[in-house]
Image: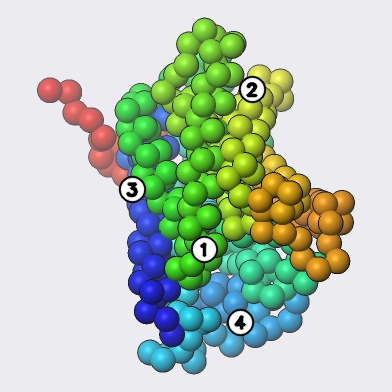
Amino acid sequence: MNGADTAWILTSTALVLFMTLPGLALFYAGLVRSQNVLSVLMNCFAIAATVSIAWFVIAYSIAFGDGNAWWGGLGKMFLSGVGFDSEAGTIPESLFFMFQMTFAIITPALIVGAFVERISFAFVVAFSVIWMVIVYAPVVHWVWGGGFLAEMGLLDFAGGVVVHVTAGVSALVLAMMLGPRRGFPNEVQPPHNPGMTMIGASMLWVGWFGFNAGSALAADGAAGMAMTVTHISAAAGAIAWSVMELLRYRKASLVGAVTGMVAGLATITPASGSVGPIGGLVLGLAGGVICYTVTQMVKQRFKIDDSLDVFAVHGIGGALGTLLVAVFVSTAFNGAGFAEGMNTGSQLGVQAMGIVIVAVWSAVLTFLIASVLKLFMTFRVDEETEVQGLDLAMHGERGYHNM
């Protein structure tokens, strides 16, 4: 074991958990009506608790057990065989388990943004746990656990496919199954607290250093470069989104700027350990522009109420970064360089195939899981509850009281 590596991953683990609690929770909570702020916070908190136990019981084994190219098996259920001296590379395996757990927490929590203000709390919890075990954990094994996508040579340093494509595609499927909020798209109330959203987004920005640089699993040059390109891409994404708003509306909004920052972060995630600073800049700018454009298309053209733009920002951002890494990994752009026998064309083919496989897997299983759960529990709340807000109906509390 290496003390420096262990100390860095201990820090990174805390940073990634900080992304969900309170970062993502506040980011999403500020974007909904005041009657639903506690609902969003509770969704994120409950997912963190329940997914943690599911990861310990079975999902870690599926993701990182000694199975085959498709799944890791059940040999590490309840952390069987993992003791104080167990190692994963240069760090304790217990720490590796914890670091990966924080990824397992935030991925289903991202999907929360697609169905806010109109979904049953019990459904959210049940779906999130089942989805993490059945959809997310196998994809982790395929990419990071030595599975078939890793054998193909897929480059996904910190989760463009594993985290963002799975969550983004699943969010779109759920939004379509659930249907739009009342008054969508023209009469939906604006975010009740953009300041809260900015605070949450800022926490995401800071926490993402653990997400991307921590994925090096060492305190080394790869971690340093991953942190550098992550910051550059986040800044470029915020600027690009704001420019798009200025061109269209003559105004740059706070919510737009922070959403662009998240788009830049999602786009650089799969490439963060492979590209240099120029790649970080280009990916951030591309993420800001393209994710902004897709956001408008999903809501205005296709009339899909992916409420907080999970598919457009995370799904498209993650897929875009996964594709562009095939270009900017080249040493011509100061990237890490191709694996032996690979070039831009062949790498692009592998990246595209990985995206398609994971997107189809996520879409089909999300539809099946939701369809089965609907038979046993409430999916969408009734109209009266939706008008009143989920805070009182689901949790018996208010986020705000009139003074």
Quadrant for the C terminus in the image: top left
Q: Secondary structure at mark 3?
A: helix
The alpha-carbon separation of the residues under discs 2 and 3 comes to 28 Å
Circle 1 residue: 221
Few, some or many C-alpha atoms within 10 Å of disc 1 (few <14, some 14-19, many ≥20)? few
Determine whether 333 is above or below 73 in the image: above
The alpha-carbon separation of the residues under discs 3 and 1 comes to 29 Å
Q: Is residue 177 visible?
A: no
Circle 3 residue: 22
Classify residue 297 as left or right of residue 349. Answer: left
Of label 2 and label 1, which has the lower sequence position? 1
Residue 163 point in image, percent of width and height: 59, 54
The alpha-carbon separation of the residues under discs 2 and 1 comes to 39 Å
Circle 4 residue: 65
Circle 2 residue: 296
Residue 234 point in image, percent of width and height: 50, 39
Q: Secondary structure at mark 1?
A: helix
The kind of residue on which mark 1 rests is: Gly
The residue at 72%/73% (across/down) is 147
Of label 2 and label 3, which has the lower sequence position? 3
Q: Secondary structure at mark 2?
A: helix
Residue 294 point in image, percent of width and height: 67, 29
